[in-house]
Every structure is written in structure tokens, then in C-alpha cells.
Image (cartoon, helix red, strand yellow):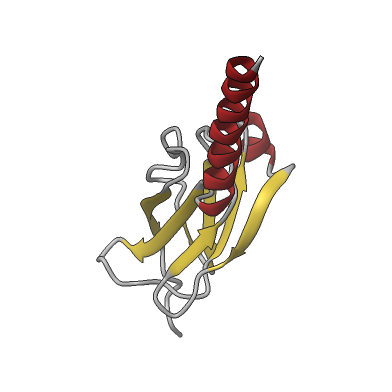
Amino acid sequence: MKPVFLFFAVLFLAFSQQEAKAQLFPTNLEITVLDDKGNIQRGVSVKLYATEDDYDEDENVVVSGKTDEKGEIKFKKLDTKPYYIRAVKGDMDNESSANQTGVLEQKRNNKVNVIVSGFALPKN
């Protein structure tokens, strides 16, 4: 009887530790936004979408925010899957560059760079 109890106690502890580790190390995505010359872009509106259709229709945003002074934004506690990214600042966006992440690695701080570009309006 004791060996069976000991087995279940060890099994319970193993799963409890995995759950605690998952809570301590969530799946995050850190995005750095740069322009096509490599300059950091602060104040960029960034949205994540779960599907390409949602991205195309600009609906069902999973999470959104703006980049900080370092051109970075961090989204926490995401699912381990690919996401579609829309980054917009004025007349610049990431439509002409990559707009999809790879599958995010579980319990990691995944990092990607996004390039925004656009056409400057002529000054009068």
C-alpha cells in the first residue's frame, strides 16, 4: 500500500512543479520596431492577430499596444503558435516586410524585429 501511495505522491509533485514552472516562465513575445534604415521607432501601434483572416480584416485583435522609447513592446502569456503582426506609425507600416512570427517557443521570451516603411509626404 505504501509503494502505491508513494508513487502517486511523486507523480503529483512532478505535475505540480511543471505547472509552477509554466506560471513562472510564460510564453512572451518581444517586438522591436525599426524603420527601413535601422532606426528605432517609438510610439508605433502594434497589434497581434491569431489568424491571417483576422489580420487581413483588421479584426479580433489578440493584444495591442505601443512601442516604448527603445522601440520595443512586450506581450506576455501568449499561446505557443504563430501570430500576425500589424505595426503602424503615421504613413509607415510593415505591409511590405514580414508580418508573421514563427511558432512561439513555450516558456521563452521570443524576440522579433519588425521593419516599418512608407512614403514621406512632400513638404510645402
Compared to residue 6, the image places residue 73 above or below, namely: below
Compared to residue 10, the image places residue 114 above or below, namely: below
Q: Is residue 31 left or right of 5 when viewed as pictured?
A: left
Question: Most extreme residue toward the left, as rendered?
Answer: 37
Picture quadrant where residue 14 is located: top right
Closer-to-camera residue (109/25): 25
Residue 118 seen in the current view = no
Question: Most extreme residue toward the bottom, as rendered?
Answer: 124
Q: Position of residue 66 (x, y in %)?
A: 57, 68
Picture quadrant where residue 5 is located: top right
Residue 5 seen in the current view = yes
Compared to residue 43, the image places residue 14 above or below, namely: above
Question: Most extreme residue toward the right, as rendered?
Answer: 60
Q: Position of residue 107 (x, y in %)?
A: 47, 44
Query: Which quarter of the image is occupied by the N terminus?
Result: top right
Tell me what residue is drawn at x 62 percent, y 20 percent: 2
Question: Most extreme residue toward the front, as rendered?
Answer: 2
Q: Is residue 71 left or right of 9 when viewed as pictured?
A: left
Closer-to-camera residue (98/119): 98
Tell me what residue is drawn at x 54 percent, y 69 percent: 90
Q: Position of residue 119 (x, y in %)?
A: 41, 63
Compared to residue 111, the image places residue 89 above or below, namely: below
Q: Position of residue 39 (x, y in %)?
A: 30, 71
Tell me what residue is drawn at x 51 percent, y 61 percent: 74
Numbered label tally: 0
Closer-to-camera residue (120/37): 37
Closer-to-camera residue (107/110): 107
